[in-house]
Image (cartoon, grey):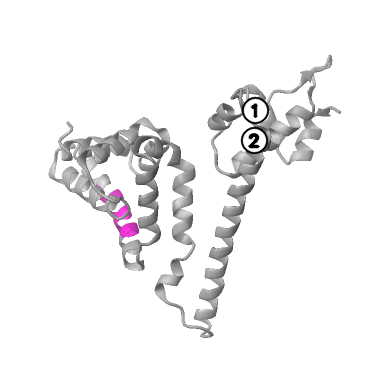
Amino acid sequence: MEYTINKMAQMSGVTTRTLRYYDQIGLLKPARINSSGYRLYGQKEIDLLQHILFYRELGVSLDDIAAILQKPDFDEVAALKSYYEKLAAKHAQLEKIMATVKKTIASKEGDILMQDEEKFEGLKEKMVEKNEQKYGSEIRARYGDEKVDTSNAKLMNMSKEDFDAMNQLAENIFILLEKASATGDPASHEAQKLAAKHKEWLTYSWPGYSEEAHAGLAEMYIADERFAAYYDARVKGGAQFLRDAILVYTGMK
């Protein structure tokens, strides 16, 4: 059975504009185009769209989805099992956050006494999961699974005080980045103070510090557009300046 682009959109919940874009970038092409110029989709395209939407739900980029689906050894059944496991983990995490919210409400209403540490159950897990989805493959390729797993465990075991301090320090880094970048000199006192604060921020989650690892992370800030966008969204050219400041700080420049 074949479906027009309108029927495909109606059935999947994806707009026709998105389907045309997927066709344009080669991610999902129609099975054929009929004599009237209409795109027609078959069973193979339906299954591919389902995979695309599953991956999108897990936060995978379109470029990465294309690379996965185009692998000669792509296994649909294995992929579906993997989706299920990851969605089950997300479901369990969401339930934990919901339980924390429910407990917080009961605490505010005076029904129970809630410890401060309990208020962050599920939230740290969400932070770890988000980082894994967004940067996990690159960081694991550079530093190895053992170091990343140890870092995640350190974050999960963090106290409320350290969790708050780490988040506050992350915000202070942006404030320092704005001031330091205004000097235009990555070796300036302000820039080196920024690099030192960045090191301090890393030590909250890193199992150990090394100048080489710090410099390597700084290089990723400009090599990967997702890292660059994180800093550049707050300070124009911020990723490049932070990287240069860290390289000076670590003696790599």
Corner quadrant of residue 186: top left
Badge 2 crowding class, 10 Å Cα cut-off, few under 14, some 14 to 19, many 20 or more, is many
Q: Which residues are magenta?
A: 166-176
Q: Are marks 2 and 1 in contact (CB under 8 Å)?
A: yes
| Circle 1 SS class | helix
| Circle 2 SS class | helix
The residue at the point 38 percent across, 39 percent down is 139
Number of numbered discs:
2
**Left or right of 172 on screen, residue 186:** left
The image quadrant where one finds the N terminus is: top right
Q: Position of residue 127 (x, y in %)?
A: 45, 54
Q: Position of residue 200 (x, y in %)?
A: 24, 52
Q: Position of residue 107 (x, y in %)?
A: 50, 80
Badge 1 crowding class, 10 Å Cα cut-off, few under 14, some 14 to 19, many 20 or more, is some
Task: Please say if 76 is above or below 25.
Answer: below
The residue at the point 37 percent across, 45 percent down is 146
